[in-house]
Amino acid sequence: MDHRTPPDRDRAINAPRVVVVLIATFVAVHAVRMMLPDRQGVWMLLAFAFIPARYADTAAYPPDFIPGGIGADYWSFVTHMFLHGDFTHLLVNCLWMLAFGTVVARRLPPGRFLVLSAVSGVAGALAHLAIYWGELVPVIGASAAISGQMGAATRFIFSAPGGLFHASRMHPAHVRVLGLLETFGTPNALIFILVWVGLNFAMGLSGIAFLGEGQRIAWEAHIAGFFAGLAIFGPLDPWRRNFPSRQNVLH
């Protein structure tokens, strides 16, 4: 029996439709913002970015200092994921989503994939809010959501030899998902987690810019998004019931 996922010969981009649509949306939003006059472009950025200062004492800022009003207090938890600082930031996020989002989206139905991505992005925004409460420090980009996809992928790309690219070619019915505690007990998965977290800490705390992320990396959002995706992948995964229950002790 061939356990590989049959290639889709009719599609120029061999990635799940939900991933292609998300990337196309990121590109479209960025193109619209770049075409706007400077003033409107800045308004769009501030109205839809996630900014902790929205939740501070309103007396600290003049009225309408941050556009968006009460609505932005809620929608910016999601809309910030669709904005990117520049083309390099956009390109890097799209490439990471093609790598990790594709393998996760082949395992999850589109709706569950979007839930995992949204929850990871919101977790990143909450971490940013907790650390920069009341400050005028906006965060934009899909990095936290993609970090959640990376965390989710960690649950199964290390369950068999071959890693990410092997898992991307296999039908999900033949790739076992690791339990949450089992993931931390799997050497390759643990090394991946420690290296990824360590790099984010190092680059974030040192203030080093990385591939278009701008002057600072939202390392706290990346880490929060990663562990959110790692934690919630088990309950969302429809294939986990195909394997022995020992890995399902804790999702």
Image: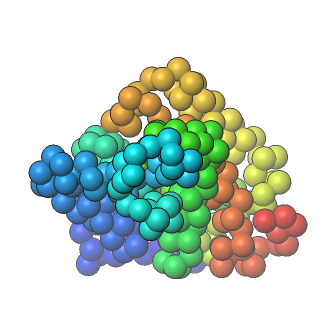
Q: Please state which of residues 22 and 123 is positioned toward the viewer in this rendering.
A: 123
Residue farthest top in this picture? 206
When asked about the image quadrant of residue 172, the answer is bottom right
Height in image: 216 above or below 63? above
What colouring style does the render use? rainbow
Height in image: 241 above or below 51? below
Q: Is residue 49 something one can see in this rendering?
A: yes
When asked about the image quadrant of residue 116, the answer is bottom right
Q: Along the horizontal axis of the image, is 110 left or right of 20? A: right
**Percent coordinates x, y for residue 14 in the rendering:** 34, 67
Height in image: 99 above or below 212? below
Q: Residue at point 87% right, 66% down?
A: 249
Q: Is residue 78 something one can see in this rendering?
A: no
Q: Residue at point 48% right, 77% down?
A: 110
Q: Please state which of residues 245 and 82 is positioned toward the viewer in this rendering.
A: 82
**Percent coordinates x, y for residue 1 in the rendering:** 57, 77
Q: Please state which of residues 9 and 110 is positioned toward the viewer in this rendering.
A: 110
Q: Residue at point 50% right, 71% down?
A: 114
**Percent coordinates x, y for residue 7 in the rendering:** 38, 72
Q: Along the horizontal axis of the image, is 93 left or right of 27? A: right
Height in image: 87 above or below 155? above
Q: Please state which of residues 243 and 64 is positioned toward the viewer in this rendering.
A: 64
Q: Along the horizontal axis of the image, is 36 left or right of 92? A: left
Number of numbered markers:
0
Q: Residue at point 51% right, 50% down?
A: 58
**Percent coordinates x, y for residue 195 in the rendering:** 63, 33
